[in-house]
Amino acid sequence: MPPYDPSAFPPFAVTVDLVVLTVRRHALCTLVVRRGEAPYQGRWALPGGFVQAAEDLGAAAARELVEETGLCAHDPASPPPVPTNGAHLEQLATYGAPDRDPRMRVVSVAHLALAPDLPAPRAGGDANSARWAPVEELLGEDEAAAAEDGGPAALAFDHARILADGVERARSKIEYSSLATAFCPPEFTVGELRRVYEAVWGVSLDPRNFHRKVTGTPGFLVPAGGTTTRQGGRPAQLFRAGGATLLNPPMLRPEV
Amino acid sequence: MPPYDPSAFPPFAVTVDLVVLTVRRHALCTLVVRRGEAPYQGRWALPGGFVQAAEDLGAAAARELVEETGLCAHDPASPPPVPTNGAHLEQLATYGAPDRDPRMRVVSVAHLALAPDLPAPRAGGDANSARWAPVEELLGEDEAAAAEDGGPAALAFDHARILADGVERARSKIEYSSLATAFCPPEFTVGELRRVYEAVWGVSLDPRNFHRKVTGTPGFLVPAGGTTTRQGGRPAQLFRAGGATLLNPPMLRPEV
DNA sequence: ATCATAGTCGTCTTCCTGACGATAAACACG
DNA sequence: CGTGTTTATCGTCAGGAAGACGACTATGAT
């Protein structure tokens, strides 16, 4: 079989970028790394890197995730061979505007990862430093903050758009799936899960109705057996994520 | 600014593939073209092509759509400059397994297009012929048909997976958005819209409850003023798609 | 002992949906 | 010209889910 005529198509570089989300101190945060070189030197950017020659896109994303956070991706398709603390990882979207990188034509396949609260990130590879940044701070979700912080806090390349798309994906997907449990440790309480919803959506939910909803949906939560008082107050029952991945009827996001 | 070191990353070819869906004779159909060259010579495949050097991904998809169908893509972000018959076009997912094309490393950014019923497709460019094929026939959605037709009807490359993902996206997205109107002509009746849902989901819906639902959702449908009897029976009121793009509460897909 | 905090169980009202009866307006046929 | 068929549209009713909110429980802090 003849190979493609190299003059028939332009060469591209293909990268993966990661939107790694977690909930820290009641706020939705994302992992950003400081760029050490031009362009956008010194600016914050999403972690990412080149896809290698014989590497699948999802594998490249999982590799970058390990390099940046030590998290082992929990691909729903192939169960993890290593019983480590796993994060949810899924493809988000692909960004390939011709001028998105001034050096050459780069197409980036963005992935979305959801992780429980982690210790301070370890800077990996080519990143000078890394941190968890509240997405509200990076995106300037209210107009005033956007006009004020928009300049200095703005992310490199088109990463603000990628981050916004990833946040929107997470916000909508926890409505109708059990994805919010990916933000929680393996065992968690109903209140901790509720605080995840409140942080991701930026709302406050009625604890009683939330409790009725999640405990009344078959297969969503399974009791883990113990209780905990790590949140203070009355001891709360510990749960584990159940087998159900789809939430029907969905959790309703409040209007305002 | 120095360009990238060409040895630092492997070169990729980037293509766009299209899942073009329409409803024909009560069945969900997709556009497929017959391959004229190896590999998979003579097999059906999704239409697609290389992304050009200075072309955005969405623009490449829109260009391929015009070449294959004559449809002008209706990008929600940028309103169409040409008032032609527009189709909905959105990015679907990206497929880049290292061995998905035996000739070289190809990453394909698949797009999903929804169009009203069209006349017979015109074969464009490098395609020997093109046709609208029922997705049930291509995917073999019941096990018996899959075992029987699986061999000869199977699509080239990983296009069966891409098509399945596109169909699933369409099926879920018409639940909570007004996307089903993209399958209809500019003016349509409630019954025609219901038949779209029935064809895409493969179910039958109660006409009375469906009518109550779509006419009771503010901003979903706006009366166009006339009536039609093109479906037979009592004349039905004509509607146009309203401004509301999100359907809340969503249309519920029946269990079975 | 008292208070603050968080969790859990109920109740009530409202809204939405599914099931289905009934009527209306066209056409096809004898 | 009536009758049957088809499709559209309006109404009614019961069941379920969700929002609002009261009440009680079990911890730790002071």
Image: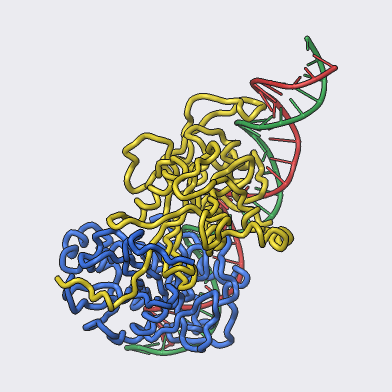
Chain colours: A blue, B yellow, C red, D green
> Whole-percent x and y of residue A203?
38, 64
Residue C27 placement: quadrant: top right
Q: Nearer the viewer, residue A90 or A7?
A: A7
Q: Nearer the viewer, residue A120 or B60?
A: B60
Q: Is residue B89 left or right of residue A227?
A: left
Let me know if residue A190 appears in the view.
Answer: yes
Residue A53 vertical placement versus B84 (above, below)? below
Q: Nearer the viewer, residue A99 or A119?
A: A99
Please report the residue visible at 42 percent of the width from the left and 79 percent of the height from the top.
A62
Please report the residue visible at 66 percent of the width from the left and 49 percent of the height from the top.
B203
Q: Is residue B62 left or right of residue C30?
A: left
Please report the residue visible at 38 percent of the width from the left and 86 percent of the height from the top.
A70
Q: Is residue B60 left or right of residue B180?
A: left
Q: Nearer the viewer, residue D30 or A102?
A: A102
Residue A179 vertical placement versus B52 (above, below)? below
Q: Residue furthest left?
A: B1
Q: Residue furthest front?
A: A2
Q: Quadrant of the C terminus of chain A?
A: bottom left
How many discs appear? 0
Residue A31 placement: quadrant: bottom left
> Whole-percent x and y of residue B225?
48, 25
Let me know if residue A28 appears in the view.
Answer: no
> Whole-percent x and y of residue B24?
60, 41
